[in-house]
Image: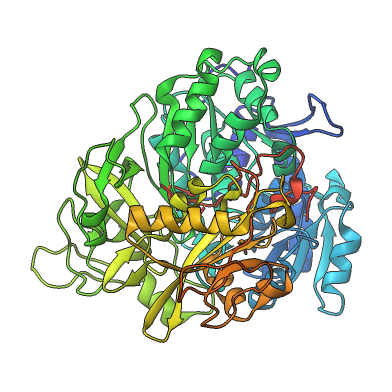
Amino acid sequence: MDRRHPPLSPACRTLPQHVRHWADTIPDRRALTFVDFPAPGSRGVHRTLTWRRLDLRVRALAARLAAQAEPGARVALLCPQSAEYVIGFLAALSAGLVAVPLYPPGLPGHGDRLSGVLADARPTAVVTTSRVAKEVRELVDGSGMGIICADEVPDNEAGDRPPVDVDAEALAYLQYTSGSTRAPAGVEITHGNVVANARQALAAYGADTHPVTCVGWLPLYHDMGLVLSVAAPVVRGALSVLMDPAAFLNEPVRWLRLLGAHPRAIGAAPNFAYDYCAGTVTDAQKADLRLDGVTALINGSEPVRPGSVDRFQAAFADRGLPATAHCPSYGLAEATVFVGAARPGQPLGRFALDRDALAAGKALPARPDDPRAVLLAGCGTPAGQRVRIADPVSRAVLPEGEVGEVWVQGPNVGRGYWNRREESERVFGAAFAGEADAPEGRWLRTGDLGAVLDGQLIVTGRLKDLVIVDGRNHYPQDVEATAQDAHPAVRRDRLAVFAVPGGSGERVVLVAEHVRAASLASLDVPAVVRAVRGAVSMRHGLRLADVVLVPPGAVARTSSGKVSRALTRARYLEGAYAREGGAEVGSGSGGGAAPGCTAGGTPGDTPGDTPGGAPGDTPGDTPGGAPGGTPGDTRRGAPGDMPGSSADSTSRAAG
């Protein structure tokens, strides 16, 4: 039944109106399947809602919400990953309220963020489930917020209540940024923004003209998970198959099995997840995989590495995976999530760039085999919006091949930041300077650096993260990639490079986790430090003043799983890594280096080194440089590494 081509997407203004449309036109077709994995080795317990049933549950919960909150009030979603999360989000919109997608209390290291977001959004009500209701009540005790358990609202409360007829420009939800470079801010996303972005994504991945199934595990409080597992399927009338992030981390083959079980499947994950699958799925698990029906694998939320795509393809090519299914993508919460993507059916866009030229702001080609070349994946082209590269200082449009700030304009760009008028005007109200033929209107300043080459968007890094030493630009993720390849004790994608003030200018510090398989006492810390410093010096001409090795989990991450260089830097400066048992090698000049296991380093270097984590581990965050992500771990059974999962205490898209 689900293989039939659904009717064309209707011209509805809101997501709840789309749900009602599909409930009227294809009521018995599957809308949402949540797959639970109650035990190790489980093949999954499927709970499916048809469009008729989804509409009924949304209307029932919307009626309860409308009785407790006035139109325009905020409603916090503190649900575990589940069908109830989807119902709660759609019900808030259906009642004319403003949803605030969050996560239940108990996510390690993110309690302060959750409390801060609740204080900023000031919700009137909270939607949760009976499973975590006790913890939620303790969190909001004394706040006056009403608590509604979505799974306890009876069907008969729905009545004949239609979705509230709101304007497309009305506020639908607040998407709080992950906070990788600053404190989280609530992006104001309108009903028109999210519907437009869903249609843009559907068009980019070829889902606007063919039936598809969206198969996802990304947390729904993250922009990429919310749009690709909820908004896009709702707009298209497509089936969404959803699982918990912890279920993926415990057994990544589960996601691949679900992709293979559904025709024309579309999946999305941060770059780390593809490395994780390639390194963790066993030959025995591969034996029954059939991936020839996969249409698109979206790679976003953190920088896309061509090598990761190659490893994933090599691991699953004999399972029928099309080499042209990989779609590096770019996006950010301020643009709802999706900005641009490589299209399915096209070969991966590979770019080898000269490192010295890139540091000088020029994207010049280099030989791919040149050890000093920077290898990047192209994030394709935008769909339904405009992208330009701007000089961040002069605000002039830059030509193809020059690196500048990525600016975006389109119907998917949010209204601004909640309760941050000045910052909203600066970020969402940018205007190009100079020539009469300069692009007109208001533009979104993304804060991301990139260039256009051969018509494709190349994302090179974050403007705020750029490390500048002696007038030369260094991209931290580039230095981090070199460091993690320098020694097997350094845990992959669990490290941060940043600059701190020094006596004679900026000093560059690297904080890295050591692999789980090793202990600090068992590692030759000076040897690790020498390998890392030597590799970084040789490839980048950069001297690391400190190399600090810390235990697994010590490098700060955002709620979406991305490494937070800003928070890691703050912890370093306040000496937090000394209290956490870090080991360092260096000179001891400058604040905050973590004493522990000290070995002789280069004279003048500051102490800082601790042995690293499991090779292949990687944090996640959204498309293309991307709409958001989630941390990974190459070891089996490490759900605590994944924010937002219902089993642990856990959009910018990167390309």
Residue 323 visible here:
yes
- In this rendering, the answer to whether 409 lies above or below 33 is below
Q: Residue farthest to the left? A: 436
Q: Residue farthest to the bottom? A: 503
- Residue 128, image x and y in percent? 80, 57
Q: Is residue 593 or residue 522 the one in the foreground?
A: 522
Q: Is residue 11 or residue 218 the one in the foreground?
A: 218
- Residue 561, image x and y in percent? 61, 55
- Residue 205, image x and y in percent? 42, 33
- Residue 595, image x and y in percent? 66, 74
Report whether 349 appears left or right of 612: left
Q: Is residue 176 or residue 75 the one in the foreground?
A: 176
- In this rendering, the answer to whether 626 lies above or below 421 is above
Identify which residue is drawn at 80% across, 61% down: 106
Identify which residue is drawn at 26% across, 60% down: 359
Identify which residue is drawn at 33% across, 72% down: 469
Residue 9 visible here:
no
